Amino acid sequence: MGHATRSLEIARLLPSNGIDVRFSSSGQGLTHLRASGEGSRTEASPPLDVEWTPDGGFASNSVLPRFPLMFNKFLRQVAFEEEAIARFNPSLVVSDSKLSVVIAAWSKSKPVIIMLNQFKVLFPPRFRNRGGLLFEGVAGDALGLLWSMGDRVLVTDLPPPYTIGEENLTGMSMSRIIQFTGFTVPRVRVGEERLQRAKTALGLDGRPLVFCPISGPDVTKGRFAETLLKAREKLTENYNLIVSMGIAGGSTEPRRLAGGGWIYEWCPIKDELFELSSVLVARAGLSTIAQCIDRLKPALLVPIRNHPEQLSNAEKFERLGLGIAIRSELLTPQNLVEAVAKCAADSSYKRKLEVVCAVSQRYRGVEACAEIIRTMT
């Protein structure tokens, strides 16, 4: 979803009278692009996803047994993208973290820009003490060679020492084509009228607002949402509480929770609630973290279980002093409530957010990516 969202934002900045755009996506990204009015310009590519456990975690044990099947699906993706490129005949291909597109563009002799924030595949923590680091390094080197097929590599993160995904980006040896662009999330500033409408519609009172946008594959959301709902009575003693399940295409009408608070399937006023919130409770995707930094919102981050990228993102967020990270398997209603209270009361989080936000403000990632695309088209 985050990849589709930022690709759409970048495409909207390209001159419509000179550049024709086509999208390729699957799963939640495809649903989001179609819901945004881009159905006629979007190709439905074959999906390629990992397996998830019943408790909503990354099924790391299934990776090796399923590798032949996943590799076959990957080859189907490459073939699909080759056919789509041949049919559309673009002057430039942009791959948002999608390796099959890079290979397809290379095979068709098309210049390609790569946007990514994860240079290599990290192993889940449980494998990293059993020779996993060696295999992780080999896999990283192999991926580096494939990513280097791009003409430009745009890293959609902050430069060191504030790089959120630093563990996912270590070992990069492509400095001649790499450029840190800063975050690629829209910098939306919501007017007072819209904020007041949101407050009135939800009956928000003077208590601080805790906003909980749950992103990621739908199968990963159940346990997180369940813990949030168990904590709601305690939370609503001191806070307004709003939960968004992030279900693409879901109902946009809020439902009142027993014991207080509201829950959306799909929240149409996410920007307003982000602006009004005092604390975020969320997953640890880069887009969510970028918005927390740009809007100076301390957060409790709960990475998807066994999800290496989100685990390392959350750990870096906490090391920078911007909020609190709790692993999914360790999250309880009690420590959730305690972490929210600490984020709301400790002013040091806001001070450190201001430092990192000042760095982020020097970059305009969406505009920078759009300008590079325009000059190469």
Image (cartoon, rainbow, N blue to C red):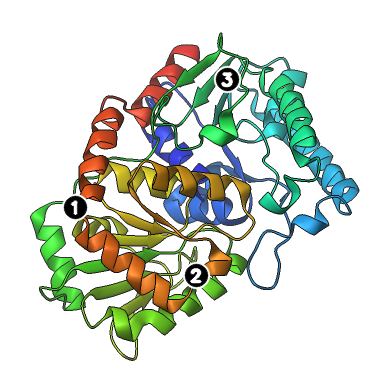
Residue 95 visible at all = no
- Seen from the viewer's position, the closer of residues 265 and 322 is 322
Residue 316's x, y, as percent?
Answer: 45, 42
Amino acid marked by disc 3: Leu
Q: How many marks?
A: 3
Residue labelled with disc 2:
331
**Type of amino acid at the residue the image marks with label 2:** Leu
Q: Are marks 3 and 2 in contact (CB under 8 Å)?
A: no
Secondary element type, mark 2: loop
Residue 204 found in image quarter:
bottom left
Q: Which residue was labeled with disc 1?
A: 347
Residue tagged by mark 3? 92
Marking on residue 202: none
Q: Are marks 1 and 3 in contact (CB under 8 Å)?
A: no
368 left or right, relative to 248:
left
Q: Secondary structure under badge 3?
A: loop
The residue sitting at 31% across, 72% down in the picture is 242
Visible in this render: residue 66? Answer: yes
Q: Which of label 3 and label 2 is nearer to you?
A: 2
Mark toward the viewer: 1 or 3: 1
x then y, percent, for residue 175: 56, 12
**Residue 4: image x %, image y %?**
51, 44
